Image (cartoon, rainbow, N blue to C red):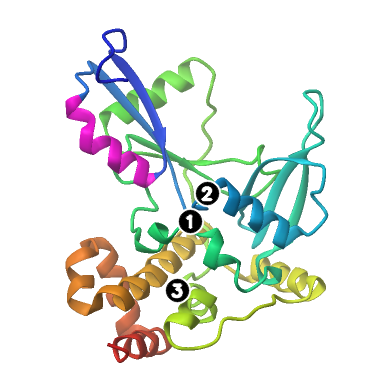
Amino acid sequence: ELKDSKDIKKLLFCGVGCAVQAFRAIQHELQLDEVYVLGTNCADNSPTPEAAKKFLSRSFKDKLDGKRVRGYEFMQDFKVHVKYDDGTDQSQPSYERLPYFSLQGDVAEFAIAKSCLACFDYTNALADVVVGYMGAPLDSSMDASSQTITVRNKKGERMLKCAVESDRLQLGPDASGSGSHEKFASTTVSSDNIVQKMAGGEMKSEGMPRLLGEIMASLMTAAGPKGVNFARYSLDYHILRNYLHVLDVWGETGTNNMIPAYSLEIVKKYLDTDESFRALAEKIKSKR
């Protein structure tokens, strides 16, 4: 439609990394005068609306029956936050929260798109501006907390300036972080059900009891990485998990040819310094 339209000459494109990559690949064919790309960070998506509904029904049982789910996200307090209302236009949103650790073990098999397991663009590198929650403190509800914003180029600077000058955006201090993230990332990979299955282990069918999951989430939130370091934890975990997936499917040569250099640099650091991750990689390579 864009290609055939003579009316649209300026476009704001919004999307996660895979959508932005697809758009950038055809952008030159659209004959647009100006293009602005606003991206979001991404850490896995459901392959279909049905899969997302199945994830919610399996994870939250009957707690969301009769409710209209407005969105859900895996947040910095190591819990899944679900925003919902009663389905009327006047209703105010409410929240249900479940610790990651209490999720059923097999939900990742159907709730995460297979293509996400071969993605290394969680930072949305081709967008002009990227907005996301991972590097910001969780100081309020899901739709009221601060966000981090990454400006990648001059066009992104113009977008940011326009938003500030029109009072649509308030800027806070530069993002910061605390706490070591590497060991948390490696431990998360080692306990990941998808990774365990790759390495020949059995996938757990049940998560922790809710009370234990709440305790674990509280401990992880208190002792784990925060702010920008939480973002580093999340990015490293997904890069390491996806490296192992690509290694499992395409082998070492295909993996080295496919994965971008910046991701391989992160992987190499863990292979050199983390014995448990190195052992996982060797176990997966030995299957071929």
Asked whether 107 falls inside the magenta stretch, the response is: no
Horizontal and vertical percent for residue 196?
A: 49, 82
Figure quadrant of residue 10: top left
Residue type beneath disc 2: Thr
Magenta-highlighted stretch: main secondary structure? Answer: helix
Figure quadrant of residue 26: top left
Question: In this rendering, is residue 23 above or below 124?
Answer: above
Q: Nearer the viewer, residue 224 or 102?
A: 102
Q: Which residue is mark 1?
A: 44
Using the numbered discs, state the Cα–Cα distance from disc 3 to disc 2 in whole angstroms. Answer: 32 Å
Residue occupying the point 54% across, 41% down? 147
Other residues around mark 1 within 10 Å, as few (<14) / some (14–19) / many (≥20) = some
Q: Which residue is mark 2?
A: 48
Using the numbered discs, state the Cα–Cα distance from disc 2 to disc 1 in whole angstroms. Answer: 12 Å
Q: Secondary structure at mark 3?
A: helix
Q: Secondary structure at mark 1?
A: loop
Q: Which residue is mark 3?
A: 182
Span of residues in magenta: 17-29
Q: Is residue 121 visible?
A: yes
Which label lies toward us, 3 or 1? 1
Tell which circle, 3 or 2, labels the residue nearer the N-terminal end.
Answer: 2
Which label lies toward us, 3 or 2? 2
Tell which circle, 3 or 1, labels the residue nearer the N-terminal end.
Answer: 1
